[in-house]
Image (cartoon, rainbow, N blue to C red):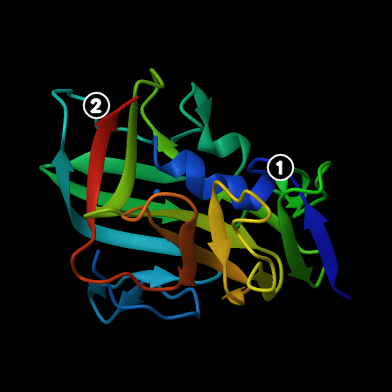
Amino acid sequence: MKKTIKTKGTLGLMGIIVLAALIVFCFTACDNGSTSSGDSLVDVIGDTVRLYNKTVVYENETSATNFAYRDWSDTPLSDYITGTPKVLISGGKLTIELDQPKSDKMKVIDTGNSESYPYTIDPSDTKYCSAFFCDPSGKYGLYPKYGDKLAVLVYVDKDVTIDSSNYNSTAFNMSGPTYDNVTLKKGWNYLIQDQSGGFPHPTIAARTLDSGFTWTVVKD
């Protein structure tokens, strides 16, 4: 079943990538949750996230190395993610280990309260949880960046398609992300937004990122 939602500003999943502009490379992807191949650790994004030895760029001076906190606050990722989430920089290299979100932290990609910002969600009961990475002080964030492109990790509980292509962005005053039949697969995905041309920002979803993406630490 499809649901059309309309909201004047950014909301829920659609709002995540706009926030990412203020605040989640290159890897081999697989969907089976495996974290090893023989004696070597391998990268995974699917039902879980396992990333190892990623280069990190610091845009601001900070000694922060633990980014297992969420939403530019002191809320630990463990409040949202099962197991023991790990987002740690050591020796200039990043390791990320995420399992599934806790069921009570998953939210339906839900409703708007205005006629100005329409999307179609299919299926309409899809739930999601985002993973923003911050240090304990909430002053520094960590996310993949490539020029004017930014990315953030989002988990969905089923395959879902988000579409705003049938709506005229000028008529609807769309000042955030646009989605042209963007499909997220069940599990973890990247939402990638191109902010090079001003509003609205075209947004896509992927399980892998271009090699030009680099994990970047920025100050709030």
> Where residue 213 sits in the image (x, y, percent)?
23, 61
Q: Earlier in the sequence, mark 2 or mark 1?
A: 1
Which residue corresponds to the image point at 56% horizontal and 61% vertical from the top-left? Answer: 178
Q: Is residue 99 visible?
A: no
101 on left or right of 213: right
Q: Which mark is residue 8?
A: 1
Q: Nearer the viewer, residue 175 or 148?
A: 175
Which residue corresponds to the image point at 40% horizontal and 42% vertical from the top-left? Answer: 21
Quadrant in the rendering for residue 113? top right
> Where residue 69 sits in the image (x, y, percent)?
46, 32
Q: Nearer the viewer, residue 142 or 22?
A: 22
Q: Which mark is residue 66?
A: none
206, above or below 188, in the image: below
> Where residue 84 sits in the image (x, y, percent)?
50, 44
Q: Nearer the viewer, residue 101 or 141?
A: 141
172, above or below 45, in the image: above
* Tag nearer the camera, 2 or 1: 1
- Single out the residue that lies furthest toward the top: 137
Q: Amino acid at mark 2?
A: Ala
122, above or below 131, in the image: below
For marks 2 and 1, give the CA distance.
36 Å
28 on left or right of 122: left
**Figure quadrant of the C terminus:** top left
Q: Amino acid at mark 1?
A: Lys
Q: Is residue 85 visible?
A: yes
SS of the residue at dot 1? loop
Q: How many marks?
A: 2
> Where residue 165 sits in the image (x, y, percent)?
63, 72
Which residue corresponds to the image point at 66% horizontal and 69% vertical from the top-left? Answer: 162
154 on left or right of 143: right
* Pointer 2 residue: 64
